[in-house]
Image: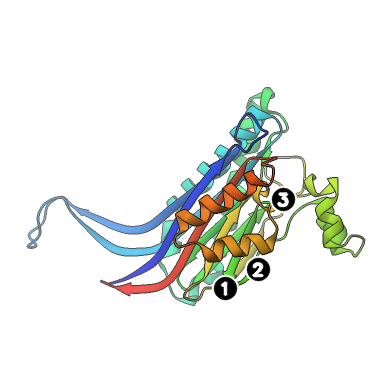
Amino acid sequence: MLISSFLSAGRTDVGTTRSANQDQYLVADLNKTMTIHSTTLPVDDETELYAGLRAQLLLVADGISGQRGGNVASQIGVGTTAAYVLNTMPWFFSLTHDHDDDQQEELVAAVAECERAVEMEAAENPDLAGMGTTLTMACLIWPRMYVVHVGDSRCYLLRNGQLSQLTHDHTAAQHLVDDGTFTAEQAARSPLSHILVHSIGRPTAFRPEVTRTNLEAGDRVLLCTDGLSSQVDDARIAELLGGAESADEATDALVDAANDAGGADNVTAVVSFCQPPIER
């Protein structure tokens, strides 16, 4: 039996200046499982048969708009998306390329369901009006990784010491970079870097971004909120991510670096070390 090998961990921290943490994250294995209650076959009752770890789901979300509203929105975002993925799990167990479009469509549908859930909760509770959240989701099905993204949380890929940002920041500052008005350095310093043009639940356009990447042995994947990326530059992120001996060590080092740099926001890091499937 082939079992995909993704060694992953997550950590979140309130930072040094905020009174509450509105970030959420999730690291989950997606398996096929059969629990046998009764059979004539030569196995014990209550035996669980596993088809092996076929996929891993990683999520980060950063709540927007007030302490309570932001926390509720990010919780709904992660919870609704995870539940939707679980209920459409068959898409994740086809390892052929025949269903590649279906898998991407289902992941976008999961984020769309999250958008509806946040909007519905805000409509039913006036105190939560205007709440929203970012959401960045990665589904790893060796050797593929699908990333669906709304907002300014990020997904990075470290390969052979080179760090690549796989997501595109949905901010007003990044929009000015895209049209040539700002340089990347100007965008990083601008107050417009904190203004989202796409998010979940807010009165902005809802345009999830989808990317697919083929993984290689030794790749390291990082999902993070802007509490990390705004405090620690890419070179330092690459150094810490590449130098860690484990995913747990990497998340600790990244979160600590953000806090050491000022910790101006909640900070969340989810890391996965990727290896090819192993035979068991």
Q: Nearer the viewer, residue 20 or 133?
A: 20
Q: How many marks?
A: 3
- Residue 65 lies, in percent from the top left, at 71, 33
Q: Residues within 10 Å of mark 3 (few under 14, many from 20)?
A: some
Q: Which residue matches tag 1?
A: 159
Return the residue found at the far right.
181
Q: Which mark is residue 209?
A: none
Residue at 61% in and 58% down: 148
Name the kind of residue labelled 2 in the image: Ser
- Residue 56 lies, in percent from the top left, at 44, 59
> Judging from the image, what secondary structure is the residue with disc 1 in?
strand
Q: Which residue matches tag 2?
A: 164
For the residues marked 3 and 2, what is the alpha-carbon distance in whole angstroms?
16 Å
For the residues marked 1 and 2, what is the alpha-carbon distance in whole angstroms?
8 Å
Q: Which residue matches tag 3?
A: 230
- Report the side of 20 relative to 207 (left or right): left
> Judging from the image, what secondary structure is the residue with disc 2 in?
strand
> Judging from the image, what secondary structure is the residue with disc 3 in?
loop
